[in-house]
Image (cartoon, rainbow, N blue to C red):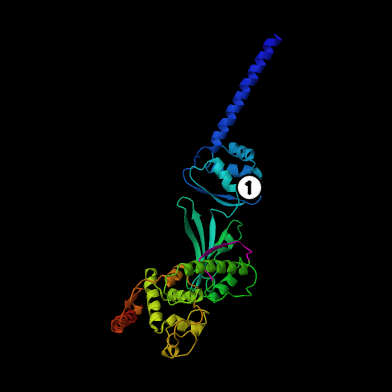
């Protein structure tokens, strides 16, 4: 009898072990299998949260089939205590294993709110936007000019959320003074700016920043990126250019940046200035004259006067020979590349054509005809109030 009982108990134990093993294998398969989510969602993990709350949230949103398996899988992979606060994009059909990896690996939030501080040539803007998980595109929540507009409540609210991301978007053609003044006005940054980099040495680009970041550190990142771009552009320059150094290349690139209205024209605009330098002609470009007046501290806000075109400054290229002594703005990568690889043309003149671009010419006679057309367009625009 005891033998039979022991045999039965052993059988039950073996069957139980097989059942447990099967259950573990099934749970592991569920943990790594494609998830049920049909449309991506944004999962927000609050500070102080835990896997239990997260698993419940995921199950309620239909992202996991079992909150318990999700928790056990996180525990089995030793990630239960590595949960990070933030907003995370959970893609459609993401497995529990993939979700656990995303919410424990750290780094910037991949979903939720983004605040973009745009540093522009004529104005600065603050843009508040949310990522739509379904389309993976940002939806604008608010946009305002901090210099003139009232700060919207949406910005204040998002500033209080720990998972909000911040970016500084610096446009091509802004001056160092404009960048520094804009950084001073960004309230998520800290510290003073004691050393302003040389004009042209800040790379126009997008920079992610964290609250409390030092303004000087942000400037240093911009300088380092511009140094890399300058070095690469100079290394890949065409032979025979009338440029003696990377500094001269940077000056020319800044002029190209300020004179280019249509990106596709950069190569032609560059060719005009290179041709003029090679022929010993004065550059005669208005943006350099404007820089001599403003020193890069804001925009002129009006057209140049004849007296200003005749006023002697180190940047007045109607009076000086060759390049001015410094860049007149921060050129982008495309303008740096155009400065060292201009199109092969015989153009030495250009004038606005009324479409935002330019009409180019090889001879003064042809240029004068283009100027006459532009004067007609200007007159028509004034009559129509444009």
Q: Is residue 211 magenta?
A: yes
Is residue 223 shown above or below 273?
above
Provide residue 215's location: percent of width, then percent of height.
61, 69
Is residue 150 shown above or below 83?
below
Residue at image point 41% right, 81% down:
277
Q: Quadrant of residue 239?
A: bottom left
Provide residue 104's location: percent of width, then percent of height.
61, 47
Can residue 316 be seen at all in this image of the molecule?
A: yes
The residue positioned farthest toward the right in the image shown: 2
- Viewer-side residue, 309 vs 302: 309
Q: Quadrant of residue 109?
A: bottom right
Provide the major secondary structure of the magenta segment.
loop
**Where does the magenta region start and end?**
202-213
Q: Which residue is mark 1?
A: 83
The quadrant in which the C terminus is found is: bottom left
Can residue 144 be seen at all in this image of the molecule?
A: no
Q: Residues within 10 Å of mark 1 (few under 14, many from 20)?
A: many
Provide residue 14's location: percent of width, then percent of height.
63, 20
Q: Secondary structure at mark 1?
A: loop
- Viewer-side residue, 341 vs 291: 341
Provide residue 165's location: percent of width, then percent of height.
56, 59
Is residue 76 shown above or below 146?
above
């Amino acid at each position: 009898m005891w033998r039979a009982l022991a045999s039965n108990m052993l059988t039950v134990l073996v069957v139980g072990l097989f059942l447990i093993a099967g259950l573990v294998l099934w749970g592991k398969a569920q943990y790594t299998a494609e998830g049920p989510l049909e449309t991506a969602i944004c999962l927000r993990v609050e500070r102080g949260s835990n896997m239990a709350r997260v698993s419940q949230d995921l199950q309620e949103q239909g992202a996991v089939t079992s909150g318990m398996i999700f928790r056990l899988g996180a525990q089995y992979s030793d990630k239960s205590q590595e949960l990070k606060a933030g907003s995370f994009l959970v893609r459609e059909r993401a497995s529990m294993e993939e979700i656990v990896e995303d919410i424990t690996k750290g780094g910037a939030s991949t979903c939720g709110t983004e605040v973009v501080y745009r540093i522009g040539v004529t104005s600065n803007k603050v843009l508040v936007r949310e990522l739509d998980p379904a389309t993976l595109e940002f939806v604008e929540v608010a946009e305002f000019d901090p210099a003139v507009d009232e700060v919207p409540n949406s910005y204040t609210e998002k500033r209080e959320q720990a998972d909000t991301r911040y970016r500084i978007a610096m446009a091509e053609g802004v001056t160092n003074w404009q960048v520094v003044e804009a950084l001073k006005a960004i309230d998520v940054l800290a510290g003073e700016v004691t050393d302003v980099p040389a004009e042209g040495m800040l790379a126009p680009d997008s920079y992610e920043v964290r609250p409390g970041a030092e303004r000087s550190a942000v400037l240093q990142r911009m300088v380092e990126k511009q140094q890399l771009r300058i070095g690469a552009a100079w290394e890949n320059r065409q032979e025979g250019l009338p440029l003696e150094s990377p500094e001269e290349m940077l000056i020319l690139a800044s002029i190209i940046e300020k004179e280019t209205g249509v990106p596709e024209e950069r190569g032609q605009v560059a060719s005009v200035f290179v041709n003029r330098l090679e022929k010993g002609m004065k550059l005669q470009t208005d943006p350099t004259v404007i820089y001599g007046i403003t020193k890069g501290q804001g925009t002129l806000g009006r057209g140049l006067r004849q007296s200003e075109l005749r006023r002697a400054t180190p940047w007045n290229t109607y009076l000086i020979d060759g390049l001015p002594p410094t860049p007149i703005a921060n050129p982008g990568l495309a303008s740096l590349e155009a400065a060292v690889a201009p199109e092969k043309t015989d153009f030495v003149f250009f004038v606005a054509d009324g479409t935002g671009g330019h009409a180019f010419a090889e001879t003064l006679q042809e240029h004068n005809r283009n100027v006459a057309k532009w004067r007609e367009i200007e007159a028509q625009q004034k009559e129509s109030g444009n």
